[in-house]
Image (cartoon, helix red, strand yellow):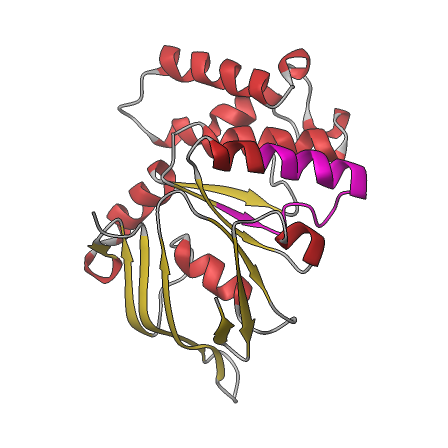
Amino acid sequence: MPPLIRLEHLVKEYSDSEQPVLALDGVDLTIEAGDFVAIMGPSGCGKSTLMHLLGFLLSPSSGKYFLEGKDASSLTDDERADIRNRRIGFVFQSFNLLPRTSVLDNVLLPVEYMPDADRAAARKRALELLKLVKLSHRLNANPNQLSGGEQQRAAIARALINRPALILADEPTGNLDSKTSDEVMDLLSELHHEGHTIVMVTHEEEIAARAHRTIRMKDGRIVSS
């Protein structure tokens, strides 16, 4: 089987300003299914750009990105959007929950973009996931009624609703206190042990230490992996 992720000399250049910015400078990387990878590096090193490229939120300027053996450069915009919704789960530092929508409906949100989805089965899975993240008692609450840790656990449940091949977590503990950070990392570690592939950006050494492997970046390049 091919690796889950393979990058070949991936380059990303931003040219919105007078002076082009080289955010990624020839990145080569392989991540196997079932890995738990932390990406670290100073601000501006390219780690968030790399995360956005892995999640099909950006396109590379050059180079190749293979997801599950499929060359992303050969995909149409609609195919990329479909893979992003079905095969990739996102967890963000800012949670990105809809403020006037219940926890249950927030978890179900990705299903709304799947016209062929079995709504009854999706609701059953959402309830199971909310039990997994210990939010069964908060189904009808809105995000502003939740603590930061509860909001992040709801976001993790949402990321899992479509059984993704890949979970991308961008600073998942960045807005949390140390106790709540530990709880969220315990949950991600549990998901990893169950076989999920997780790629996480963090600037905290103690958080990165919970991953199976740490990739360090500097000036748009991987300096250790």
Asked if residue 182 is among those painted magenta in the image, a careful observer would answer yes
Which residue is rendered at x = 57% and y = 20% of the image? 132
Figure quadrant of residue 202: bottom right
Residue 127 is situated, as x and y percent measured from the top left of the image, at 52, 14
Residue 40 is situated, as x and y percent measured from the top left of the image, at 59, 64
Asked if residue 83 shows in the view, the reply is yes
Check the image and name the residue furthest to the bottom.
Answer: 19
Which residue is rendered at x = 61% and y = 35% of the image? 97
Asked if residue 98 shows in the view, the reply is no
| 26 shown above or below 115 | below
Taking the image as shown, residue 151 lies to the left or right of residue 3, namely: right
Taking the image as shown, residue 78 lies to the left or right of residue 37, namely: left
Q: Nearer the viewer, residue 128 or 79?
A: 128
Q: Nearer the viewer, residue 134 or 193?
A: 193
Which residue is rendered at x = 52% and y = 26% of the image? 107
Q: Nearer the viewer, residue 5 or 158?
A: 5
Q: What are the residue bounds of the magenta stretch?
A: 168-188
Which residue is rendered at x = 79% and y = 37% of the image? 179
